[in-house]
Amino acid sequence: MNQNLKVYFISEKDSPRYHRCLQRIKDIGLEPVHIPAIRPTHFGEESRGSMRSKYWGSPLTLGEVGCFLAHRSAWLQITKVESGPVLLVEDDVGFSADAAHVFVAAAKRYDSKRDFIRFYSDWVRPCYRKVSITPEVILGIPLSPGNCSVAYMIGPEVAQQLCSHSKVFHCPSDDFLGQSWIHGIREIHCSPFPCIHDDGKVSIIGHRPKFNLSLPAEFQRSFYKFKTSLLKRIALLKALMRPV
């Protein structure tokens, strides 16, 4: 297997999930690179003015802030030391039997300056402009953004773009990745997904409280949802303008 393809994995050092993820990466013959998990004890300036609190009725949790900061620290390291695409995963990732072959094939096809490839999402989206990378696996442009940051591929140029647009963030990392109208990076999906979200249904990002909003706030939230839906459709049209 191609040992040049690195897998950056986010985890707390020496935790059970750390050792499980490390072994899984080694088992598929790829090179692990550890990124320490971040557990903030307070909200910093980078997450002030959360749009989710304003428009969705629930604020970011400290766990979500820590998750975003850990991904961002990985992006920063990738910009400094990498020259090509790498896989970035969270420590509750699981791999299919042929996952390593899919990752290597995707890396060969990957445009590291303008795209990122999502290898898992909460559900499978229909894809367009599809290309085969193995007899059984395709890459394509999803009908709508995915919603999970458990496994994706980026290169240093894309990592730099993500860093430059996330000095202040207003949503979880998985939502931010799908917002191409903010950071300008096109989202590609792999199908079928070579990864699973093996978290045992236990989230470490914490409880998301829900608020009862006033009527003006509900109106504002509805307008924001409509605006976001429109931006997603425009982003899809832009994405379809060039091949995968």
Image: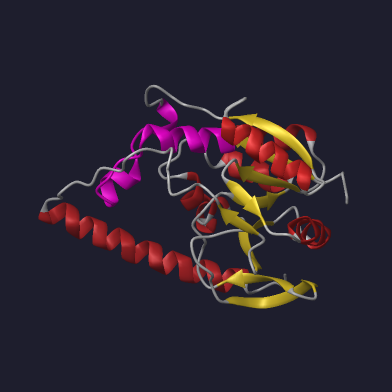
| Image side of residue 172 versus residue 12, left or right | left
Residue 223 x, y percent position in the rendering: 27, 62
- Between 131 and 230, the residue placed more toward the observer is 131
Rendered image quadrant of residue 3:
top right
Residue 20 or residue 157, whichever sits in front: 20
Q: Is residue 118 left or right of residue 147?
A: right
Q: Residue at x 79, y 38 (%)?
A: 82
Single out the residue that lies furthest toward the left: 215
Residue 20, above or below 200:
above
Residue 222 location in percent, x, y? 25, 62
Q: Residue at x 49, y 57 (%)?
A: 147
Instruction: Tell me the residue at 58%/58% (across/down).
Output: 120
Query: Is 141 positioned to the left or the right of 232 in the image?
Result: right
**Predominant SS along the magenta part:** helix
Against 16, residue 170 (above or below) is below
- From the top left corner, tell me how far across and down residue 49 is, in percent: 33, 37
Instruction: Name the residue located 65 percent from the left edge and 40 percent from the top edge.
Output: 21
Q: Is residue 232 magenta?
A: no
Q: Is residue 59 magenta?
A: yes
Provide residue 230's location: percent of width, then percent of height: 41, 69
Q: Which residues are magenta?
A: 45-72
Q: Is residue 156 visible?
A: no
